[in-house]
Image (cartoon, grey):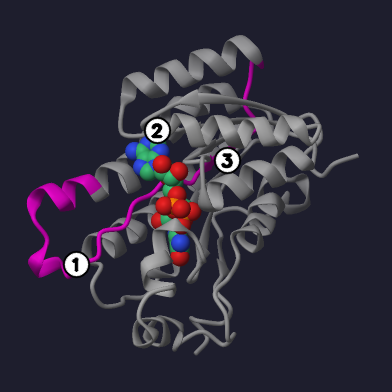
Amino acid sequence: MGRVQGKVALVTGGAMGMGKTHSEELAQEGAHVFVTDRDVAAGEAVVKGIVAAGGKADFIKHDVTSENDWNSVIAAITKKAGHLDILVNNAGILILKPAHETTNDEWDSVFNVNVRGVWLGIRACVPLMKGRKASIINISSIYGIVGAPMAGAYIASKGAVRLLTKSCAVDLIQFGIRVNSVHPGVIDTEMTKDLLHGAAEVRKAIMGATLFDRPCQPVEVSKAVLFLASDDSSFVHGAEILVDGGYIAN
Ligand SMILES: NC(=O)c1ccc[n+]([C@@H]2O[C@H](COP(=O)([O-])OP(=O)(O)OC[C@H]3O[C@@H](n4cnc5c(N)ncnc54)[C@H](O)[C@@H]3O)[C@@H](O)[C@H]2O)c1
């Protein structure tokens, strides 16, 4: 019996990086996973892999900034599954610039995906999650808790996700819906490949504050997502779970 056996899950940005491993872990533990992403080829490949491994998954093309796309995603899940138990608001983008050099368009694009996308997701999914002991997991970052150079819009957006999570925790418990945020440290994905696998001094600066001599692997974050998705976390609510190798402790 899997840890999320029979539950229905939606993972946004599930085509690669951590969204891919969240989808795979949830499916391996028995969930029917709706993988959504704007990247159709990569998203379909993730679903193919899950199904080949004996899991249950469907892909839906989805830009999280679009209310119309959210409506289509909800219609598809309603038709196929009838309800939703787990929402992982994972899709996110990073622009490497300090706030004082960020353009209006860059600021808006980061906030549209990282904050509006999460809010639209919660608003769209709550009707399908009411009364089901459901779990919403919002992916923030350690940079939703502390600052760092060169990412003003990103850090502000992840701070917004952290407190949106807590406000929704207060508002949604009446429907039995738990809401928590996950705060990864430096994770080895497409998003950070230029930073981690480029110049040695950049890698050293990025890794400098962690207490491990390696970046975190995506699946290590997925284990925290799985915990929050499962009934093992039945009294964990409005919490922020760090998966940062001790970065904040340092
Ligand atoms: N990589 C890190 O070090 C790190 C650390 C902390 C938090 N995070 C956060 O974790 C989440 C996943 O990061 P990752 O490193 O796996 O990223 P990634 O770049 O490897 O993958 C992101 C996925 O999101 C999708 N996506 C982007 N914009 C979208 C949109 N508008 N609609 C739908 N899908 C969209 C992409 O197509 C891609 O599949 C993000 O929210 C990110 O901010 C990452």
Where residue 248 sits in the image (x, y, percent)?
Answer: 48, 81
Pick the front one: 42 or 139: 42
Which element carries disc 3, helix, strand or loop? helix
Which element carries disc 1, helix, strand or loop? loop
Is disc 2's CB within 8 Å of ligand 1? yes
Q: Is residue 210 magenta?
A: no
Q: Which residue is mark 2?
A: 38
Q: Which residue is mark 1?
A: 97
How would you rate the neighbour count of disc 3 (Cα within 10 Å): few for under 14, some for 14-19, many for 20 or more? some
The Cα atoms of the two marked residues, 3 and 1, are separated by 37 Å
- Quadrant containing the N terminus is top right
Q: Magenta stretch?
A: 81-109
Residue in the picture at 78% in, 36% down: 53
Q: Residue furthest top?
A: 79
The Cα atoms of the two marked residues, 3 and 2, are separated by 31 Å
The reply to whether dot 3 and dot 1 touch (C-beta < 8 Å) is no
Precedes in sequence: disc 3 or disc 1: 1
Residue 38 drawn above or below residue 186: above
- Quadrant in the picture for residue 37: top left
Residue 218 drawn above or below residue 87: below
Where residue 101 sits in the image (x, y, percent)?
Answer: 9, 66
**In the image, which disc is placed on residue 62?**
none
* Residue type of the residue flagged with mark 1: Lys
Q: Which residue is mark 3?
A: 173
* Residue type of the residue flagged with mark 3: Ile
* Residue type of the residue flagged with mark 2: Arg
Precedes in sequence: disc 2 or disc 1: 2
Where residue 111 sits in the image (x, y, percent)?
Answer: 25, 48
